[in-house]
Image (cartoon, rainbow, N blue to C red):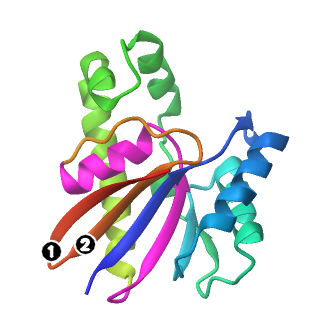
């Protein structure tokens, strides 16, 4: 049986607080979420936690494990990501890697370990929903699965499914 982690980027924000449109979008996404989640996890940023709260409002149901914060999904070197973004020729991890390969490698290890920890904590058939950021969500997937994913739009994401020690990555919209 599989274990699943869905990773989504927070919706539109102004600084660390969702905009009115970001709130509206997150509630609408919540209405479309049909899975039963064992736990919801925020990176700890207000915009990520607020997005999860809006998902729950839209879902209209409870999550047994509640909403927890896992700072392993939030970079401790955000300024370095911003500096790399200003120099990168694109928004994908490869563009960031061309500017600062050590940053991408280091963050993939840290974020990938956080993702693996969540997957390992789930029961067979379990599912978690993580809300974080881009490009660190992409780094988490790279760090755990070795797979590169395209930049994740606000509110969108990826699903990582572990089954029999193998990983499958699926895009979410």
Q: Is residue 151 above or below residue 127?
A: above
The quadrant in which the N terminus is found is: bottom left
Highlighted range, magenta: 123-146
User: SS of the residue at dot 2?
Assistant: strand
Task: Tell me if residue 133 comes above or below residue 96 in the rendering.
Answer: below
The spot of residue 7 in percent (x, y) is 46, 57
What residue do we see at 35% from left, 70% from top? 117
Q: Quadrant of residue 125?
A: bottom left
Marker disc for residue 162: 2
Q: Which mark is residue 149?
A: none
- Where's residue 44, x and y in %? 62, 55
> Residue 100 colored magenta?
no
Spatial CA span between label 1 and label 2: 6 Å
**Tag 2: Cα neighbours inside 10 Å, few (<14), some, or many (≥20)?**
many
* In this view, 48 is above or below 77: below
- Find disc 1 in the rendering and name its residue: 165
- Circles 1 and 2: CB atoms closer than 8 Å: yes
Residue 61 visible in the shown view: yes
Residue drawn 33% across and 56% down? 170
Q: Is residue 48 left or right of residue 35?
A: right
- Tell me what residue is drawn at x 56 percent, y 75 percent: 34
**Image quadrant in which you'd find residue 172:** bottom left
Quick check: is 139 in the magenta stretch? Answer: yes
Q: Which one is in front, 60 or 47? A: 60
In the image, taking residue 69 as reference, residue 147 lies left or right, namely left
**Residue 77 or residue 88, whichever sits in front:** 88
Q: Quadrant of residue 31?
A: bottom right
Binning the other alpha carbons within 10 Å of mark 1 as few (below 14), some (14 to 19) or many (20 upward) gives few
Instruction: Identify the secondary structure beneath mark 1.
Output: loop
Q: Position of residue 62 (x, y in %)?
A: 69, 84
Q: Position of residue 104 (x, y in %)?
A: 30, 34
Question: What residue is drawn where x is 70% and y is 73%?
Answer: 59
């Amino acid at each position: 049986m599989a274990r699943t982690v869905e990773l989504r980027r927070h919706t539109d924000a102004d600084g660390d607080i969702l905009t009115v449109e970001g709130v509206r979008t997150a509630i609408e996404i919540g209405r479309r979420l049909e899975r039963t989640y064992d736990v919801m996890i925020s990176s700890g940023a207000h915009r990520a936690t607020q997005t999860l709260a809006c998902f729950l409002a839209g879902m209209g149901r409870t999550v047994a494990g509640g909403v927890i914060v896992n700072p392993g999904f939030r970079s401790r070197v955000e300024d370095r990501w911003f500096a790399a973004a200003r120099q990168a020729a694109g928004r994908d991890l490869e563009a960031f890697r061309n500017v600062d390969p050590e940053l991408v490698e280091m963050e993939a290890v840290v974020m990938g370990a956080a993702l693996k920890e969540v997957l390992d904590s789930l029961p067979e058939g379990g599912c978690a929903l993580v809300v974080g950021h881009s490009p660190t969500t992409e780094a988490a997937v790279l760090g755990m699965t070795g797979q590169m994913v395209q930049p994740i739009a606000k509110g969108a994401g990826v699903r990582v499914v572990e089954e029999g020690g193998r990983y499958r990555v699926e895009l979410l919209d």
